[in-house]
Amino acid sequence: MAAGTTPGAPAPVVHDARRWSRDGSPVPAPAPAEEPPPRPPGAPDVDDPAPLLRIGFMVRSVLEETRALTLDEHARERLRDLQQRALDEITRHLGPELRDELHAVRLSLPDDRVPDEVELRIVQAGLVGWLEGLFQGAQVAVAAQESAAGSQLAQLRRDALARGADQGPVPEGSYL
């Protein structure tokens, strides 16, 4: 028993700001998020969609897993930290226009206090919805590009057939 405590009295609550790994060793605190470097003009809005997909699935899974749980203060604090790290990571992979759009949606939680469950779930659901909209927009853009490429290919084929019909039959012994 610690000195200065009486038997049966509750122990003082100590908040440890350090993070710990599964094996019990301390984990260094994440570095503060840096603003990504500016992109050259004409650069794509998303460098690599794979990390965004992984983060999106992770955030959706966390939202589904925590939906039925009652979260204590420590769990809500951890979820807030996870949410902020996910937002920082997502921001690193976005172009300036999408980064501004994400910041305009204001998917942030308070830093000065532990958010309540409703705040956490609303922000998580908003982030999942924004990411799903981003992915659906990308799918529509890819489908439109494929359609445009198919139309161009069909037009080239029609033009080639029309030129071939105008030139008459191919002489024997000629290579194509």
Image (cartoon, rainbow, N blue to C red):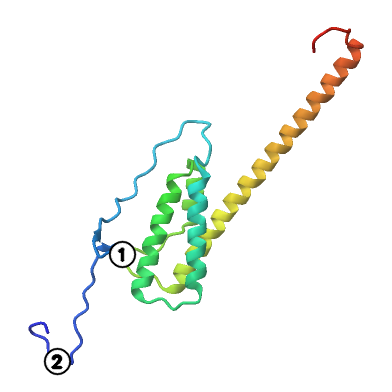
Q: Position of residue 160 (x, y in %)?
A: 82, 19
- Residue type pointed to by label 2: Pro
- Badge 2, how many Cα within 10 Å: few under 14, some, many 20+? few
The mark closer to the camera, 2 or 1, is: 1
Q: Residue at 80% x, 27% y: name it.
A: 155
> What residue does disc 2 label?
7
The image quadrant where one finds the C terminus is top right
As measured in the structure, the alpha-carbon distance from the residue carrying label 2 to the one carrying label 1 is 32 Å
For the point 23% across and 68% down, which residue is it?
A: 16
| Image x and y of residue 169, in percent | 91, 12
Tell me which label, 2 or 1, sits earlier in the chain: 2
Taking the image as shown, residue 153 lies to the left or right of residue 96, namely: right
Q: Is residue 175 left or right of residue 95?
A: right
Q: On the image, which quarter does residue 71 sit in? A: bottom left
Compared with 158, 171 (above or below) is: above
Report the number of discs. 2
Callout 1: SS:
loop
Disc 2 is placed on an element classified as loop
Q: Which residue is mark 1?
A: 22
Q: Give the label on residue 144, or none.
A: none
Q: Residue at x 45, y 35 (%)?
A: 39
> From the viewer's perspective, is 33 left or right of 143?
left
